[in-house]
Amino acid sequence: MDLQHVVASQEQGWYLKLMAPNVKGPGYAWLDPSRIYCHHQALQDCVEDLVQPFQDEAIDLVAGIDAMGFILGAAIANFLQKGFVAIRKAGHLCVETITQPYRDYSTRDKVMEMRTDAIVPGLRVLLVDQWVETGGTMRAAVRLVEEQGGVVAGVAAICIEDSEGGRWLKKHYKWAHCVPPHLMPQFNAHYLDSFQAFEAKRSLQ
């Protein structure tokens, strides 16, 4: 789908067709969701879909996870007219921080951190990342919030895959993602039917 194309009839999750497949091989994620952000209507609809399940929830703060969760999290915070706090990979914040080790989707052991002056006991926080594959990164963010006495009001991502970690998050927290149920098998298989259009275009180049 062309990034300048204006969709007249918008089915649920129509913007997911904008996501581009990995063309660089192993060592990269299987797709690039950030292409959604290049289309203003797609980004707006994505944000609205993620916020909708929380419309009756009290949310005091939005936390975005390094790095792509910053974009989506900040957009959601702006939509909700709430503050935004960044949960960063360790070693980037020059203020007092709390840290949490975790293992990401690539099975690499890492450490994340966040500032200690943003959360007070009882503060309700919506956690946002671009994608949840294994759930390790999001679960570490949950621990950072809860160890400071914050309450995780929910977790949101473009897709929360049907992994063990993804299922755990869905069981224990209110959650939102953009993928309609009938498309989940494609997402779990890491291949979308919409990739065929990209592949056809690439074969002509």
Image (cartoon, rainbow, N blue to C red):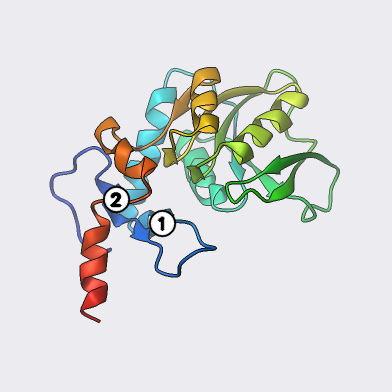
Whichever of callouts 1 and 2 sits on the residue coming sooner in the sequence is 1
Q: Is residue 73 above or below residue 154?
A: below
Q: Quadrant of the N terminus?
A: bottom left
Whether residue 1 is visible:
no
Which residue is situated farthest in the bottom direction here?
A: 205
Q: Identify the residue at horizontal 77%, vertical 56% (top origin).
A: 92
Q: Position of residue 104 (x, y in %)?
A: 63, 46
Q: Identify the residue at horizontal 20%, vertical 79% (top origin).
A: 204
Q: Judging from the image, what secondary structure is the residue with disc 1 in? A: strand
* Residues at circles 1 and 2 in contact by the CB criterion of under 8 Å: yes
Specify the label residue 20 is tagged with. Answer: none
**Closest to the observer: 88 or 80?**
88
Q: Which residue is mark 2?
A: 192
Q: Quadrant of the C terminus?
A: bottom left
Q: Identify the residue at horizontal 59%, vertical 43% (top origin).
A: 64
Q: Judging from the image, what secondary structure is the residue with disc 2 in? A: loop
Left or right of 204, for residue 137: right
Q: Which residue is mark 1?
A: 31
